[in-house]
Amino acid sequence: MMTSDENTEKVHYICQTYVENKAVNDGQPKLKIDKQFQYSTASQAQGRAEREANSESCVGADAYMVSEDLTSGEVGLPNFLVRIGNVPDFEAS
């Protein structure tokens, strides 16, 4: 049983990297999520995104945070800390 003073929200700090798939029928390469790393702090996630974006195999990287409601399990929209290189457009619905 949770009391009213217990934290019911958890923040996740994520670094997500992207690679390009080969071009398909329209001739445009498509981005694909390559790796995801979870960290305890925003600066750790941002630092990893910056390092990954400089690697030859990575075309782009995001560092973002999301809040999870521990009661319902729902996860909110990402709050981007940094977006580096070729990353997909993000449209909140």
Image: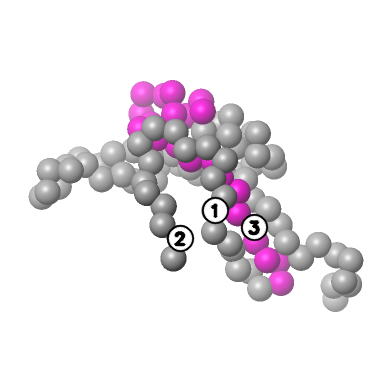
Q: Can residue 77 be seen by looking at this rendering? A: yes
> Mark 2 belongs to which amino acid?
Ala
Does label 3 or label 2 sit earlier along the sequence? 3
The numbered dot on residue 91 is none
The numbered dot on residue 67 is 3
> Mark 1 belongs to which amino acid?
Pro
Tell me which residue sits at (36%, 24%) in the image.
56
The numbered dot on residue 92 is 2
Residue 64 lies in what quarter of the image? top right
Residue 90 magenta = no
Q: Position of residue 38 (x, y in %)?
A: 60, 44
Q: How is the rendered protein coloured?
A: one colour
Tell me which residue sits at (70%, 66%) in the image.
70
User: Which SS class for mark 1?
Assistant: loop
Residue 54 magenta = yes
What segment carries the magenta color? 50-71
* Badge 2: residue crowd in 10 Å (few <14, some 14–19, many ≥20): few
Are the residues tagged 1 and 3 within 8 Å (C-beta)?
no
Pointer 1 residue: 78
* Badge 1: residue crowd in 10 Å (few <14, some 14–19, many ≥20): some
